[in-house]
Image (cartoon, rainbow, N blue to C red):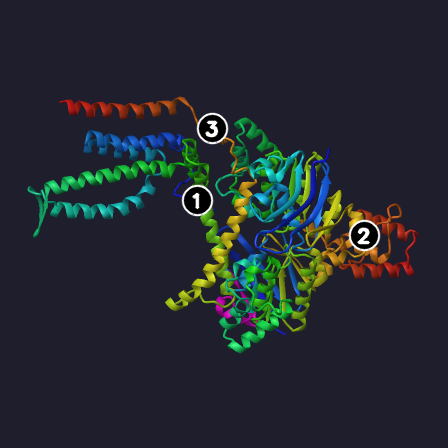
């Protein structure tokens, strides 16, 4: 089955962790360096994320994401390194171009922050079944309807792609050209798009009714097939994360008092 | 009379998962039904004939000319395919425009296309609906529009994919009529179908697909006489034939009329 | 007590002039298997939707008369309440998949989660319905990876798990191959044997004749006949209603073989076999 989700089913410790713990980790990884205003903390969290992703056998799949944001970060480094207003101390001279220490440090801070956020989110996205993730949100109070929309997107869109392929075949069978120059493609637009729209309207109506007769609109409080794992290690993970958060809060207060 | 010759044709979507395993067939002027379980390779086979897929190995000859590498648009002049779901193709706001879309695409003049479209609509029993919106009509009428839009292209070969799905008695009779008309116009008619009674009443030749191979091929009565092989393909003979089998008849009858005539003859003796 | 009571049901779709259902009344007992036949646009699907409350809750329009399942009046309750008593399965198995679940097992749980059942209750019901429909071995598959017949049986299993007392099936086999439709018919028959009332719309007359206790014939929104398959398929003017009798009945009509006891034509393979054998062995043919 084709899927648009980034998740890959693998049997690792990390995959089995409660999505809630992973969400908590994201919060901690973002808030703690912010509270402590420490780049070392960011770097440390990046390192932890890398280790977790390695354990989840999913590190490789962060490369495309990192590559994409890397491009943006490089421009940040260049612009800040050269043009930042409070630049005074030259750090690197390449011909007539001068990079300043202040700008580079600032850019380093931003880069660390971005990479840290990216890596911690990657853990959630790459190692959690989308449906589990949505279910966690629903348990936390997200409307089940919105939850349904979110989780069905992962499967319904690939199905729509298939319908699109059938429609293309049907029109090509009637002698319509779909490839070639711009005029050909523009001409092909309506014969393809109208059946797609009509089809999805019909499908959506039928599916809506099918959901309805399975009590989708029920006022009854929803229950869940999957159990929240209340193992000891889950508890430990959550406590450790909470402790880290509290400690950094205390640290912040101490810095103020000083 | 033209024919389609399929030589040693293989096809797979992904490696190691063959869908068709070396098909050798010659399709001729006989009306032909292709039957078999879902997933037996029937639809893939038809898509290959239509050029929507290319064989991974083997050739398809149309009157001796290799067409397996021709484009879909080139083939559209010769081979028409009616898709299962009319909603996959209908996009015009007027019936007549929808039916004329194919003919114009394959290079017919406006007048010719109009002429063919009118004729096709009257064959499917929808004359007079030219200016209606297809989406104001019921699903079975839309199915007929889809059939008309292929008939209007006046191709030498007409292929149907499950024409009788969810159709009532009247609509099935209409489709029978259309197939007979096409046959008498000298067209080659081919269909994928699950309705065995319909096959028995309407098709001269039947081909059974099973697991990407041709399991049986021959005159319809002979194919339906092969009880064991049909079971092997998870198919059952038409209802009339089932009754023949139960009664221990040597002959295989396909239609109510033939069966009744035989019983009356034997009773007279 | 009757399971389903329909009294003078009338319905007109929004933006149309003609009634789609014209004053329909009938009662159905627990465990009955009812076949619903008739030509396209006769009102078969409309009637199905009215029994579940999709009409008038989902489709508005003009509604008259009453539909009771036990003592629950369908029009006065939301679909989510009615669906605990009546389940419905549609023609296209594909559009009944929620698309939000990754395995067959979870897919069946969808309705049960909405009903607020406990986890153990859910698992017990899911196991039961998967086994009943003979798809237990596919429980970990992705719903979209099943064949048409398997997917349709999954759709039925998802309804069964909700433990309705009535199940309505609207042309559930039209998209399936012969084996797939036989699987569905057998599964549905075993449900009716468990005491669930079944109403099934179907164009395959031989199957309707073989499985139904009674057959309801609709034409232009009216109920034309509601009787045993033998009586309904023996109607002289059946073709005027856009219905073709089973092949076995047509053969016997042409041969003039009636069942001596009830004066009807045979409708199933077995009945026809018996009647023709009798004829061969010296019975009377009116030639």
Residue nearer the viewer, A181 or C35: C35
Q: Is residue B115 above or below residue A249?
A: below
Residue nearer the viewer, B123 or B255: B123
Image-based side of A258 in relation to A174, left or right:
left
Categorize mark 2 by other alpha carbons within 10 Å: few (<14), some (14-19), many (20+). Answer: many
| Residue C231 in view in this figure | yes
- Residue drawn at the location 32% of the way across and 37% of the way down: A121
Residue at mark 3 to residue at mark 2: CA–CA distance: 57 Å
Secondary element under disc 2, as helix, strand or loop, is loop
Image-based side of A66 in relation to C149, left or right:
left
Indicate the quadrant containing the C terminus of chain A: top left, top right, bottom left or bottom right.
Answer: top left
Same-chain status of marks 2 and 1: no
Give how far across and how far down residue B242 sits, in percent.
76, 52
Q: Is residue C202 magenta?
A: no
Provide the residue span drawn in magenta. Answer: B56-78
Categorize mark 3 by other alpha carbons within 10 Å: few (<14), some (14-19), many (20+). Answer: few
To which chain does the residue with label 3 belong? A
Is the residue under label 2 in contact with that under label 3 (CB below 8 Å)? no
Q: Is residue B57 magenta?
A: yes
- Residue drawn at the location 56% of the way across and 65% of the way down: B132
Residue matched to label 2: C234
Give how far across and how far down residue A102 sits, in percent.
11, 40
**Residue C138, numbered circle:** none
Residue nearer the viewer, C214 or B240: C214
Categorize mark 1 by other alpha carbons within 10 Å: few (<14), some (14-19), many (20+). Answer: many
To which chain does the residue with label 2 belong? C
Residue at mark 2 to residue at mark 1: CA–CA distance: 52 Å
Q: Is residue B144 above or below residue C63?
A: below
Give how far across and how far down residue C182 sits, in percent.
68, 46
Image-based side of C285 in relation to B130, left or right:
right
**Residue A154, numbered circle:** 1
Residue matched to label 3: A227
């Amino acid at each position: 089955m084709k899927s648009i989700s980034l998740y890959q089913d693998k049997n690792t410790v990390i995959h089995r962790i409660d999505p809630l713990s992973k969400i908590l980790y994201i919060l901690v990884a973002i808030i703690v360096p912010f509270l402590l205003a420490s780049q070392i903390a960011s770097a440390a969290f990046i390192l932890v994320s890398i280790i977790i992703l390695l354990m989840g056998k999913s590190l490789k799949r962060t490369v495309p994401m990192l590559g994409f944001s890397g491009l943006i970060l490089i421009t940040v480094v260049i612009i800040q390194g050269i043009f930042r207003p409070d630049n005074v101390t030259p750090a690197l001279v390449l011909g007539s171009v001068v990079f300043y220490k202040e700008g580079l440090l600032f850019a380093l801070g931003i880069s660390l922050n971005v990479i840290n956020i990216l890596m911690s989110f990657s853990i959630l996205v790459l190692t959690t079944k989308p449906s589990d993730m949505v279910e966690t949100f629903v348990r936390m109070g997200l409307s089940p309807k919105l939850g349904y929309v979110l989780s069905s997107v992962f499967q319904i869109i690939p199905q729509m792609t298939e319908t699109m392929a059938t429609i293309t075949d049907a029109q090509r069978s009637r002698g319509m050209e779909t490839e070639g120059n711009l005029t050909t493609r523009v001409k092909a637009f309506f014969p393809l798009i109208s059946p797609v729209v009509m089809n999805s309207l019909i499908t959506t109506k039928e599916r809506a009714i099918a959901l309805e007769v399975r009590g989708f609109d029920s006022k009854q409080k929803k229950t869940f097939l999957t159990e929240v794992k209340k193992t000891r290690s889950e508890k430990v993970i959550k406590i450790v994360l909470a402790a880290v958060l509290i400690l950094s809060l205390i640290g912040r207060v101490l810095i103020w008092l000083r | 009379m033209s024919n389609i010759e399929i030589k040693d044709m293989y096809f797979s979507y992904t490696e190691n998962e063959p869908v068709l395993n070396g098909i050798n067939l010659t399709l001729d002027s006989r009306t032909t039904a292709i039957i078999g379980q879902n997933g037996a390779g029937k639809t893939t086979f038809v898509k290959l004939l239509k050029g929507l897929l290319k064989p991974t190995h083997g050739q398809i000859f149309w009157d001796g000319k290799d067409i397996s590498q021709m484009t879909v648009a080139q083939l559209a002049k010769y081979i028409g395919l009616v898709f299962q779901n009319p909603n996959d193709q209908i996009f015009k706001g007027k019936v007549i425009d929808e039916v004329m879309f194919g003919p114009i695409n394959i290079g017919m003049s406006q007048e010719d296309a109009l002429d063919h479209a009118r004729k096709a609509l009257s064959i499917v029993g929808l004359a007079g609906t030219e200016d209606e919106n297809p989406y104001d009509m019921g699903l079975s009428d839309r199915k007929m529009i889809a059939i008309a839009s292929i008939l209007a292209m006046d191709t030498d070969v007409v292929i149907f994919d499950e024409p009788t799905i969810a159709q009532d008695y009247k609509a099935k009779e209409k489709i029978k009529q259309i197939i007979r008309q096409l046959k008498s116009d000298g067209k080659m008619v081919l269909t994928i179908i699950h309705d065995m009674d319909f096959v028995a009443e309407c098709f001269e030749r039947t081909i059974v697909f099973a697991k990407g191979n041709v399991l049986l091929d021959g005159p319809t009565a002979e194919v339906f006489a092969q009880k064991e092989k049909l079971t092997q393909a998870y198919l059952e003979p038409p209802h009339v034939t089932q009754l023949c089998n139960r009664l221990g008849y040597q002959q295989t009858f396909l239609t109510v009329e033939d069966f009744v005539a035989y019983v009356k003859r034997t009773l007279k003796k | 007590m009757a399971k389903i009571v329909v009294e003078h049901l009338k319905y007109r779709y929004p933006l149309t002039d003609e009634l789609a259902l014209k004053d329909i009344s009938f009662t159905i007992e627990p465990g009955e298997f009812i076949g619903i036949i008739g030509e396209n646009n006769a009102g078969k699907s409309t009637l199905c939707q009215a029994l579940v409350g999709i009409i008038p809750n989902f489709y508005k329009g003009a509604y008259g008369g009453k539909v009771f399942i036990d003592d629950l009046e369908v029009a006065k309750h939301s679909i989510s309440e009615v669906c605990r008593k009546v389940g419905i399965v549609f023609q296209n198995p594909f559009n009944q998949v929620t698309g939000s679940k990754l395995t067959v097992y979870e897919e069946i749980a969808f309705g049960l989660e909405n009903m607020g059942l406990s986890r153990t209750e859910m698992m017990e019901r899911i196991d039961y319905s998967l086994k009943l429909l003979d798809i237990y071995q596919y429980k970990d598959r992705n719903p979209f990876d099943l064949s048409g017949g398997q997917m349709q049986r999954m759709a039925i299993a998802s309804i069964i798990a909700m433990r309705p007392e009535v199940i309505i099936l609207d042309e559930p086999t039209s998209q399936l191959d012969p084996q797939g439709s036989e699987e569905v018919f057998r599964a549905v028959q075993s449900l009716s044997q468990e005491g669930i009332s079944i109403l099934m719309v179907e164009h395959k007359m031989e199957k309707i004749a073989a499985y139904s206790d009674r057959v309801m014939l609709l034409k232009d929104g009216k109920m034309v006949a509601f009787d045993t398959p033998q009586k309904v398929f023996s109607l002289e003017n059946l073709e005027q209603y856009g219905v073709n009798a089973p092949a076995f009945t047509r053969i016997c009509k042409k041969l003039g073989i009636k069942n001596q006891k009830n004066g009807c034509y045979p409708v199933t393979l077995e009945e026809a076999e018996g009647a023709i054998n009798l004829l061969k062995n010296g019975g009377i043919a009116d030639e």
